[in-house]
Amino acid sequence: MRIERLILKNYRQFRQAQLKFAGRAGTDLHFLVGTNASGKTNLLNAINWCLYGDEPHLSKDSQQLPLLNLITLDRAEPGQIHEVSVEVWTETDEGALLTFVRRAPFSKDDERQVTQQGTTFTVHYTDTEGNTQICKDDAALPWVERFVPARIREFFFFDGERLDSYFKQATAQNIRHAVFDISQLELLESRVQKRLESTLDDLTKEAGRANPKIEKARAGQEQARAQLDDTNQRIEECERQIEIARASLAELAEKLKGVPDTIALDEERTQLDERLQDTKRLLKAKVDERETLLIESGSLLMLWPAISGAQRLIDEKRKLQELPPPVDKALLDDVLRTATCSVCGRPLDDESGRRVHALLQEVELASQSMHRLQEMEIPLYGFKEEVELFRGRVEVIAGEIDQHEKTLEAFAARKTQIDRELAGYNEALISRWYIERTTFEQTRDQNQQRLGALLSMRTEAEKDFSEAQEQLAKELKKEERVRELRRKVSFCKRAVEVVRATREAIVTETRQRIEAETKRYFFKLVWKRATYSDVRISDDYGIRLIHSMGYECLGSLAASERELLALAFTLALHRASGFDSPILIDTPVARISGEQRGKFAQVLCEVSTSKQIVLLFTPAEYSEDVSRHLSGRASSRFELRPLAGELETKVEVL
Amino acid sequence: MTARVPDRLYIDRADRELYDDQTLKSEVFAQRENRDQFLFAMCLGFKHRVRRHLNSREGFFLAKNLRPKDEALIDSVALHESKSADVLADREQVFLIAEEYAHAGIRLLHGEATSGQPGSFIKRLELELFELLEDLHTD
């Protein structure tokens, strides 16, 4: 099937646009070129809206805007109805026409508020005889499924930049679902297997009505199955989380290669600041200590002649035993008081009295001086010790000051070094990466632990289920009345097993086919062929890219190579699916450069010989490498031209 | 002999602004009491053997704030000046000698502290003190 025509009316920036994709013998390749915001992605959205009622590639800006073209909206009178419509005209291989039409009426009120008045979806099928069948709304959905099933539309209509992220998130799960969807096993599973399982349940319920023990066993089996299903779901989710974490860690490892550990360096810098402050405080204390020592001991040194003179005087007085004085002052006081000599007992005359008084004064004077000298003695000897220790203490403090200054220099140098290491880096962004890495590591580790427990639980649940099945079978066997039912149950079980085995076989075969095709396309697309030796999709649906030296290297692929691998996989899915529906790729080579673009174009040309391919390029993407391969082979070429104000885009045929 | 013991030590009124000078405060007298500032000025005056008579006296700190080692220093200066232990009985004379040396010393100190780069006075003081120490050992 191929898209023959696309007609848009009032759909976003396309007021009136029609694209005819005329086929040509040997090629069904079409491309559009449009600048950013010209409407390329909205063409993709238009097709999705028409077929599925949604717009999965809508930009943030467009999400704020109504579906209705803004010029039409502006010109609309309040109460007037204007319709948005998108028609996708397709042609089957047999020549029949299948037209998908979605319409949505809009009205505007007095306050310029626009309201959508529902939506209608119609499919017109006209066979080669000209007979037309029309289906509407839900009845039309099966036709969509025949064209491009909703579940796998992302492999047919997609954004090229999305390809890069395809392998980032839960690769194995993505691939398993893709293989399953492409294998079209939904019919087998939903119609056949589920029907059989439902019939089996009904039969066993019927048997249970005949015998309560059978009912109990049946209920037990049901419970065990529910438990097993629940455990399997949890395991799947756990594995998905582990894959997401692993992929994110690989991506972060790439980003952080060669990048300094900003968190650790920032922490070190903060600690250095604290230690700098502490050391400055210690330095200041030592400087103050030195000053105090210089001032205090300096005083002693400056006064040393006086101090040593005083010491000598004290020593002399001590030698002469003038310290303390030998005169009994109290005796002299008493003599004067009593005016009587206490030695001979004679009264004192004036002369004697004056001489005793003078002697007492002399004693008092001498005593006061000697008393002072005596009091000076201990401090003076302390000064001597202080002076002797002065040089040593100054040198010790000088050494400590020197050490602190060196420490400050070292800290300052290390801070400068850290600043230099971090210069040019966006510290906040890098710190976020490190935090994300830690978070993903924790997620991975926690989920791995959980997975271990869940796998044990599953083993137990499988055992319980198996036992419950055996118990039910035993009870059924015992009951004669349900022999016929038992036969039917046995048949259903066998049929379910056959369906399951068939499904697995189909999935395996599809997986192997997809693996082979992915490898084929990848080695056609990739620039460094000799670097890689193999592409594998293992039993667990993990995709492995093997380096020519034998190790796995998916995690270290450049973004462009990852995109090529994802494209190879997508093309492989197309070949394996049996759907010959067209591929539409928006910005197909955004991350691919140089010679790889040429190879990309070559591969698409090859694919376009048997499948319609529509490519939406920006002018930068449509480089010489690309146009050299494509322009000669293209069946149609269009340019999207935004008009003034960017409220409308015209489609022009090149 | 005099029995009067002065209750405080004096500076020349004109010296107040020198003691309050910011450079002196930051270079030499950071967080030091009046007593310590006075004694250091006295030491410097003694080192240079310069005494100056006070023209107008202003109380600077109380005598009771003198510690025993401070008294010992002042007494040593008085002893050295008078060459007789008798001076020690005359506290007025002892204090006067100290005050006159401090009066001369504070001017010398202000001149030295404000003449060089900030922080250089302490460095020069250290060198001078080491020289004094050398002389001491030589003697």
Image (cartoon, grey):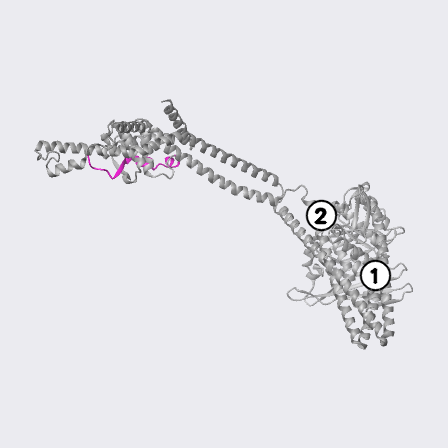
Amino acid carrying label 1: it is Leu
Closest to the observer: A314 or A318? A318
Relative to A463, residue B138 above or below: above
Is B13 one of the magenta-colored residues?
yes
Residue extending farthest to the front is: A344
- Do pointers 2 and 1 mark residues of a single chain? yes
Q: Position of residue A239 (x, y in %)?
A: 73, 55
Q: Residue at 77% of width from left, 62% of height from top?
A: A462
**In the drawing, what numbered circle is on residue A3?**
none
Relative side of A577 to B115, left or right: right
Q: Is residue B8 visible?
A: yes
The answer to whether A174 is drawn above or below residue A131 in the figure is above
Q: Label 2 is found on which chain of the structure?
A: A
Q: Residue furthest right?
A: A129
On screen, residue A124 above or below B18: below
Image quarter where the N terminus of chain B lies is top left
Image x and y of residue B24, in percent: 37, 35
Identify the element where label 2 is drawn.
helix
Q: Residue furthest top?
A: B138
Mark linked to residue A250:
2
Q: Which residues are magenta?
A: B1-27
The answer to whether residue A241 is left or right of residue A366 is: right
Tell me the tag on residue A185: 1
Q: Which of A15 and A293 lies nearest the eye of the viewer?
A: A293
Residue A92 in the image, given as x and y percentages of width and height: 87, 59
| Depth check, front residue: A401 or A39 | A401
In this rendering, position of residue A520 left or right of residue A461: right
At label 2, the amino acid type is Ala
**Rendering coords of residue A270 (x, y %):** 55, 44
Q: Marks 2 and 1, how far apart in space?
A: 33 Å
